[in-house]
């Protein structure tokens, strides 16, 4: 076992078995996927994020207390961010460097932080290496405490950025933007909020995050449960107590086993009287090679170390001449087969690790994921699998079906009643929705969602023609990066460059041209759907729960290196991609 758990497995595993073995595993993957698709032909409609009536409590902010009263705001700022997470913080830093003074963040939470404001569940952490994930480390002269940062450290870092760049001054919290409407006469955005504000802004940045609106599975009888319940992004510490001692005498059920649940379950298992984990599809659990930052290493880091580290990470991996020749000689089918076999090999190592750690054989079998690695968000944890060796922790494997019935006592599954004191929903979030809670109307009065109805149309995933001075962060048609802050930093740098360009040239507005937008839509289409991987994957939010998608309605798959090149090209040739107006 020792060698098995020394290093994360990754995708470097070498295929060493017969092709028949890999083909059989692929068949099993397909069966498991089909089982799930048959249970849920309704795709993304199996979830709801419309939390009204009985469901309204699942979205209440448990961290902020009462909403602080204030007078409605009626003023004008130069740049307004909808959302106060990393997108806003990173871009603001770059705007400040370029001399922009009037910056306002409007945020639903009671502080900055976005994801890291809302997600405070026990064990919350990020499993992208902290020296890469935490942005602006050079600027803040900060070195993370560990190889992987925990939630509270990341949240504190967000607050430190806001303080350093003086972003609290104009920020408004506990406020949701409800409409963002372009005024063509004034060449300004008019915004209204749920607090009665009427704000004006010259530039608006949709920084509402990629996974920000919690969602619940539509489970029959969910609202009839008489015990306590909450979503992981609204953790009720008043009930559980900060050290989870409130669960000592409680029977706890958690629904979902995605990346959030994987981090929360070890703490819950240690604290609860009984813990029932209701699993629909297991996550892949790899090693988390964490360690405290070496203070000597940290002290010796030269100024600008993070920028250099990021620049290195953005470089395209260079193949040797021999590697290139070998690749060129291989047919498309051979390349795919090699990749798939290596992927299956990696998944088999994930399975072996489960066998080595989980003592009960039936539980170990149930915890084994049967899909290609990366079909779902891979997870990294050293305490998740051992938690299932605790006598008080019970895995309830629904074998792909999921929980479909809740009653006043708890969960009902195949005629068996699970009586619970509390149900925790680890059922995830709406994905990459621009303008959640918010109606965005552009120059021709068209709502952005209506424009997108026939397919998303943007330039670089950031600009959409007819929506001048509006910038979208973390939306579709942009590149996807496992380290999201790297992507957001690239977008933030670009947005700051565009705003700076407009200010320097005395332009009141900047809008993508129809031709530039069309070019980008075709780029997105060209780079999507080259393999069947998406359809072959088990359903999840990565593949829109198996729903049909237009090829343009997703991320740009040409690679991050290429995406950054395109950002640079557009910045270098602004006149070719944008139209400008003077006031
Ligand atoms: P996910 O959408 O990844 O997971 C939702 C879970 O709920 C899935 O396991 C899903 O099963 C399950 N589920 C849904 N409906 C039912 C049902 N009726 N019965 C039983 N189970 C059900 O949400 P998360 O909050 O876990 O993660 C969201 C994302 O946030 C991650 O993918 C990651 O990008 C990010 N994140 C990153 C972390 C990190 O850095 N470590 C930590 C936490 C989150 P099924 O798989 O079958 O659909």
Image (tube, helix red, strand yellow):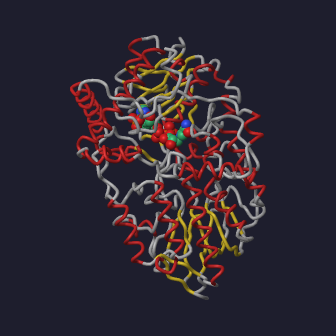
Is residue 221 visible in this depiction of the protein?
no
At 66% across and 67% down in the image, what residue appears?
196
- The x, y position of residue 505, in whole percent, is 63, 83
Res. 447 image quadrant: bottom left
Instruction: Determine whether 121 is above or below 111 in the image.
Output: above
- The x, y position of residue 367, in whole percent, is 41, 23
Task: Name the residue nearer the viewer: 98 or 423.
Answer: 98
The furthest residue to the front: 321
At 49% across and 62% down in the image, what residue appears?
565
At 71% across and 73% down in the image, what residue appears?
74
The furthest residue to the left: 20
Quarter holding the C terminus?
bottom right
At 21% across and 26% down in the image, what residue appears?
20
Along the horizontal axis of the image, is 119 left or right of 19? right
Along the horizontal axis of the image, is 502 left or right of 164? left
- The x, y position of residue 81, in whole percent, is 63, 64
Task: Name the residue nearer the viewer: 452 or 158.
Answer: 158
Instruction: Determine whether 141 is above or below 462 in the image.
Output: above
């Amino acid at each position: 076992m020792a060698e098995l758990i020394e290093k994360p497995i990754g995708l470097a595993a070498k295929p060493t078995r017969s092709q028949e073995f890999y083909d059989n595993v692929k068949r099993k993957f397909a069966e498991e996927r089909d089982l799930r698709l048959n249970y849920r032909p309704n795709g993304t409609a199996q979830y709801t994020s419309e939390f009204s009536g009985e469901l309204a409590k699942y979205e209440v902010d448990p961290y902020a207390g009462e909403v602080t009263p204030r007078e409605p705001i009626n003023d004008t700022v130069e740049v307004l961010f909808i959302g106060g997470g990393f997108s806003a913080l990173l871009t603001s830093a770059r705007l400040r460097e370029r001399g922009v003074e009037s910056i306002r963040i409007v945020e639903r939470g009671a502080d900055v932080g976005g994801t890291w404001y809302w997600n405070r569940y026990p064990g919350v952490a990020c499993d992208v290496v902290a020296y890469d994930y935490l942005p602006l480390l050079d600027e803040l002269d900060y070195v993370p405490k560990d190889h992987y940062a925990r939630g509270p450290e990341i949240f504190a870092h967000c607050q430190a950025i806001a303080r350093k760049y003086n972003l609290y001054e104009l920020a408004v919290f506990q406020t949701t933007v409800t409409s963002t409407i372009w005024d063509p006469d004034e060449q300004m955005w008019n915004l209204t909020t749920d607090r009665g504000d009427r704000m004006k802004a010259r530039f608006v940045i949709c920084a509402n995050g990629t996974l920000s609106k919690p969602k619940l599975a539509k489970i029959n009888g969910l609202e009839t449960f008489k015990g306590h319940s909450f979503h992981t992004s609204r953790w009720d510490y008043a009930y559980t107590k900060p050290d989870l001692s409130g669960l000592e005498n409680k029977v706890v059920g958690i629904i979902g086993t995605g990346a959030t649940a994987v981090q929360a379950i070890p703490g819950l298992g240690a604290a609860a009287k009984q813990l029932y984990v209701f699993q629909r599809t297991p996550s892949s659990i790899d090693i988390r090679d964490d360690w405290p930052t070496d203070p000597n290493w940290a002290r010796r880091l030269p100024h600008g170390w993070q920028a250099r580290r990021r620049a290195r990470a953005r470089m395209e991996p260079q193949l040797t001449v021999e590697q290139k020749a070998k690749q060129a000689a291989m047919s498309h089918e051979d390349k795919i087969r090699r990749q798939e076999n290596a992927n299956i090999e990696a998944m088999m190592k994930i399975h072996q690790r489960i066998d080595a750690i989980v003592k009960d054989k039936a539980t170990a079998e149930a915890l084994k994921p049967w899909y290609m690695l990366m079909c779902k968000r891979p997870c990294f944890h050293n305490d998740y699998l051992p938690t299932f060796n605790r006598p008080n922790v019970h895995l309830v494997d629904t074998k792909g079906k999921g929980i479909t019935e809740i009653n006043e006592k708890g969960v009902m599954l195949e005629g068996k009643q699970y009586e619970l004191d509390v149900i925790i929903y680890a059922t995830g979030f709406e994905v990459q929705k621009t303008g959640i809670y918010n109606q965005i109307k552009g120059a021709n009065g068209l709502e952005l969602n209506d424009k997108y109805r026939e397919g998303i149309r943007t330039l670089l995933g950031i600009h959409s023609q007819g929506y001048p001075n509006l910038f979208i962060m973390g939306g579709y048609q942009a590149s996807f990066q496992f380290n999201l802050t790297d992507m957001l930093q690239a977008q933030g740098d670009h947005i700051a460059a565009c705003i700076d360009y407009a200010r320097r040239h005395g332009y009141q507005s900047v809008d993508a041209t129809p031709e530039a937008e069309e070019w980008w839509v075709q780029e997105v289409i060209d780079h999507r759907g080259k393999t069947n991987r998406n359809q072959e994957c088990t359903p999840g939010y990565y593949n829109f729960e198996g729903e049909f998608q237009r090829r343009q309605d997703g991320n740009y798959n040409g690679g991050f290196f290429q995406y950054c090149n395109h950002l640079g090209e557009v910045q270098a040739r602004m006149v070719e991609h944008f139209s400008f107006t003077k006031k």
